[in-house]
Image: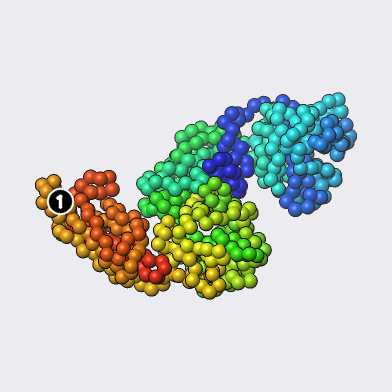
Amino acid sequence: MCVVRAGRWLIDVCPLFFLLFTLSFLIPSPCSAAVLINEVLYDPDGPDTGLEFVELRNCGSSAVLLTGWTLETGNGANPDDWTVEWTGGDFDRLEPGEILLIGESDVLPTPDIVEPLDLQNGPDGLRLTDGAGVVDVVGWGHPLSPEYYEGEPADDTSLGLSLARVPDCFDEGVNASDFVAVEPTPGRRNAEGTDVAIAVAHRVGEVLPAGDVTLDCAIANVGALPVAGGEVTVRLFLDESLLPTVESVVDDVLAVRDTARFALTFDPGASGYHTALVEALLAADADTSSNRVSTSFTVGSPGGQIVLNEVMHSPGEHETEWLELVSVSAMPVRVDRWLLGDDEELSAIVCAGSSRESGGGGSNTVRRFKLAPGGFLVVAREPEVVEPRASAPVVSLASWEALSVDDVVVLTDEYGTPIDIVRYERSWGGDRDVTLERVRPSLPSDDPGNWGSSVSPEGSTPGRVNSIHVSALPEAGRLTISPNPFTPDGDGIDDRCAIRFDLPTPQATVRLTIFDVLGRVRAVLRDHDLVASTSELVWDGGGEDGAILPAGIYVACLEAIDARAGILVTAKTAVGLVR
């Protein structure tokens, strides 16, 4: 599996499928030569020595005698610099469709011809001659002199992948499109019979609006045979459900190397973070390893698994910047592929070298980097500086964007889906060698009242419960509404009601929401506003769109927090609207 960045998109796709997904003109054509270089592995996974191979295939209809033929490697650093790696003997002969595997001693299965090869990472080339002239050339990497490739060089492959013609013998005379990166298949077909692969295009960094969600998908024919319309069924499983949320049939006829694009639209059922598994079903599929792809998306607002819990944005002398994450999930969450940064640049969390998993209240030795429910993870610019006083694993980022007193921190999963976004300001808290701490992980990240300066004697609490954390049950506030009910009918009598709230704290950040009896939000009258202990507002009965709500019973819900006093307040009361 690879993840390819393209602007604000990620393509979750196997190496072979990415090329097919991005090229729309790949239609098979007759081979231009009888014997072709069919597959090359020049950068094996592990030591190169012993595992390199080249596969030749007779794509014609007659046997070919290879006496005097040569296989040569080209040094892309110099023009026309070829070295003979193999020369055909008197009895080397290829029947129609037959494969000749030339490889080193550790290749499995054992090559037909065992030879030490000197294949290099690009830019480099390989050519086949018949003693009289050049039969085939393949080049990879950029830049290359023209004698090292046909049409355009293929891109360098990732470690452990080979360059292969898919389907076998596909030859348009352009290396860039003739060859794709695949798992090595020495001595056997590069594409087996009927085979499809699926991909999902992923929007990076976007929070989708509430309502129906549409995922853009594609199906590619990566096999050697065409696929008829209606043979492929696509299913989407939401949030690890055992039953598909949506199912669709692909009506397009897929020629070899063809791609069909389509959309899956469905209702996720709730705001927040969701995962999705998309699966392609084809009865005759010869290789189902590329038939499933996972992705994720966030609807309405980020959150639901991990949140940012503490920020050291102004470290003292000989100290370092760091961030603390805490899990609010009920299940362990793997984070070693996640990304952190700002709203312009994200970098991967690097967990190599540590094997600890943090649980609520401590850290334990585990494999793979996961956060247990309530567990902490510290991500530091210089981990070795924070580790001596941290009570949880300390890891780093592939690259660190410097923090400031007014900044934004973005946490995403491996696909680029926002998990938490915090746009903090100097006024929220934190100072020289004093961290900005979160009051309660379960409360909104964008609420200034949910943040404050650490009151720990050390000025921070890396890997521990925050010093200003509110763990007690909410204290009661009081809501008073008068008149109740009221009649917003425009006659000048009781057209508005006054809503008064009394809080057990001098001031707090409040949110006042009007719900209907089904629990739906109909109006937000205060949204994280800082108010005094006794405050009042007037409501005219209007909803979120400004129109007067229908007659009925509604519920006014008050949520207030004072981070510095450690007080969380809630209150509810019913209000009647008559028209």
Q: Residue at coordinates 74% horizontally, 34% vertically from top-left?
A: 143
**Circle 1: element type:** loop
In the rendering, at what x and y percent does residue 113 appear?
A: 83, 43
Q: Quadrant of residue 499?
A: bottom left
Q: In the depicted view, which residue is nearer to us: 97 or 272?
A: 272
Name the side, left or right, on which 97 lies relative to 275.
right
Please tell me which residue is depicted at 45% across the width and 60% down the height of the picture: 428
- The amino acid beneath tag 1 is Asp
Scheme of colours in the image = rainbow
Direction from residue 514 to residue 389 in the image, left or right: right
Q: Which of 472 and 274 is in front in this view?
A: 472
Image side of residue 57 versus residue 281, left or right = right
Image coordinates of residue 182 in percent, x first then y, are 66, 43
Give 469 or 377, whichever is nearer the viewer.
469
Viewer can see residue 152: yes
Residue 448 vs residue 294, the one in the foreground: 448
Q: Is residue 306 above or below residue 14?
A: below
Whole-percent x, y for residue 241 in the image: 44, 55
Mark count: 1
The x, y position of residue 25, in whole percent, is 59, 28
Label 1 environment density (alpha carbons within 10 Å; few <14, some 14–19, many ≥20): some
Q: In which image quadrant can residue 226 be found?
A: top right
Is residue 379 in sight in this rendering? no
Image side of residue 68 versus residue 62, left or right: right
Q: Which residue is drawn at 31% across and 70% down?
A: 504
User: Mark 1 — residue?
Assistant: 495
Residue at coordinates 41% horizontally, 68% vertically from top-left? 564
